[in-house]
Amino acid sequence: MDEKALYLINYGLYIVGSKTESKINAQISNTVFQVTDKPSVIVISIDKSNYTHEFIEASKLFTISIIAKTAPLSLIGNFGFKSGKNVNKFEKISHLLTKNGLPVVLEHTLGYIECRVVNSIDVFTHTLYIGEVIDAEIFKKDEPMTYAYYHEIKNAQAPKSTPIYQQPKSSKKYVCKICGWVYDPEIGDPDGGIKPGTQFEDIPDNWVCPVCGAAKSDFELLK
Amino acid sequence: MDEKALYLINYGLYIVGSKTESKINAQISNTVFQVTDKPSVIVISIDKSNYTHEFIEASKLFTISIIAKTAPLSLIGNFGFKSGKNVNKFEKISHLLTKNGLPVVLEHTLGYIECRVVNSIDVFTHTLYIGEVIDAEIFKKDEPMTYAYYHEIKNAQAPKSTPIYQQPKSSKKYVCKICGWVYDPEIGDPDGGIKPGTQFEDIPDNWVCPVCGAAKSDFELLK
């Protein structure tokens, strides 16, 4: 058995949002598909240990914000590598609330789908939520992000398999211990104000990982 | 509400196979995702009116053959636009049978996943089958087909929005009334032995639609 065959399944990349009586939260999800056309019904899979799971259990409602292919890694980092238990993920993110009070991300998204849970099923560590579509809008016609493309751009900057001794001494790469993103001095982090050609050591101490927001001190030399 | 937002969901394209005591069958599906990692569990959605639905109900087993991006339209046509009620879809298709006797397509596929149904849930016109992975193999490392790419290559040959009067008289396009595939004389159907530059009228009568196998008489002038 070669379980790597499972990596050949195609996925998109979405932000699934929900609410409790007093809060909103959202998380990255790649597991979304349409089940039936009449009525329009969607299924999503949510890890039971995720904060958003509590929110969907409470409200029986969820939104799916569709991420654009052009979205920066920082958007995915904000919703994917942080927990709403510790931070307000929407603090610095432009968003709208639907009539039902559910969050929809407006930055780097193409549209959204809002669903009411009509059924759910327990699958070991996850719950499948089956949701009837109650609202849907398109903001922009463009290509949606795919999980494959996200991994491509995330890894293209420095495949982990690259032995460090093949790198010139002037371009030491550093990897984020939290999310695995690699800082490559040749590329820098232009979105974060770090010009190409900047050595890791010369980056200001208040700089954070563009993907997950981890501190500079959470990086280690890529070996 | 703009239900077109649902078209922004990303999908792959797979061939889902199953068996009864005496037969095998398979169908095209775009609705497959992994739910949990430990154990490895997959969910698929199957239309209750499809023949393969009966087979999965009977055997409680299914395979997912992962289609390569380079697969010809005819492969998708064979499994997607025909019913196993009328034809043996595997008659001319190279395939293997797993230890459990389930079919796996060997032509233009990258690998397969075999699952045992551990749960299922009724969703209006469809059933969601939740399957624990019992076997998986990779044949070839290459890009998997996506639903978006399939539509792109299918439609690139002649967008339906193209007004026919803009076409020179010598390149009248014809559309298959069964599956919507468009014959463009400039492209021909090289896989089917029809050279580029061949007018639709000059195609032999025994030629069939490369996607769904419909007869030449099932085509009409694209307007």
Image: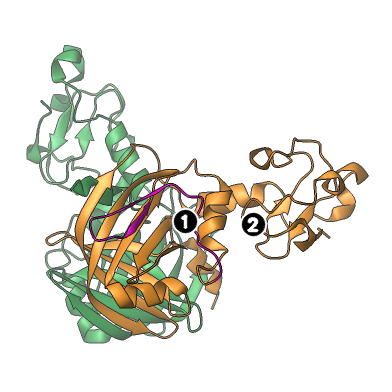
Chain colours: A orange, B green
User: Quadrant of the rendered structure where residue A64 is?
Assistant: bottom left
Residue at point 50% right, 62% down?
A88
Taking the magenta stretch, the answer to whether it contains residue A103 is yes
Which segment is the magenta one? A86-104
Which amino acid does the dot numbered 2 rest on? Gly
Which quarter of the picture shows residue A48? bottom left
Q: Nearer the viewer, residue A94 or B140?
A: A94
Label 1 packing within 10 angstroms: few (<14), some (14-19), many (20+) = some
- Secondary structure at numbered mark 2: loop
Q: The disc labelled 1 sits on which kind of residue?
A: Phe
Q: Nearer the viewer, residue A17 or A143?
A: A17
Instruction: Name the residue at the front extreme.
Output: A22
For the residues beneath circles 1 and 2, the answer to whether they share a chain is yes
Give the residue drawn at x 57%, y 54%.
A151
Name the magenta segment's main secondary structure.
loop
Give the residue at mark 2: A213
**Is B202 part of what is drawn in magenta?**
no
Q: Residue at point 12% right, 38% down?
A: B216
- Position of B34 compared to B196: left or right? right
Q: Nearer the viewer, residue A213 or B116?
A: A213
Q: Is residue B166 visible?
A: yes
Q: Is residue B116 above or below residue B34?
A: below
Residue B21 visible (yes or no): no
Query: Which of the two discs, 1 and 2, labels the residue nearer the N terminus?
Result: 1
The residue that label 1 is drawn on is A90
Vertically, is A188 above or below B85? above
State the image coordinates of residue B20 (x, y, percent, origin top left): 22, 82
Report x, y in % for residue B195: 31, 28
Q: Which mark is residue B87?
A: none
Q: Residue at x 16, y 59 (%)?
A: A37
Asked if the residues shown at circle 1 and circle 2 are in contact, with their CB atoms under 8 angstroms apart, the answer is no
Please give the chain letter of the residue carrying mark 1. Answer: A
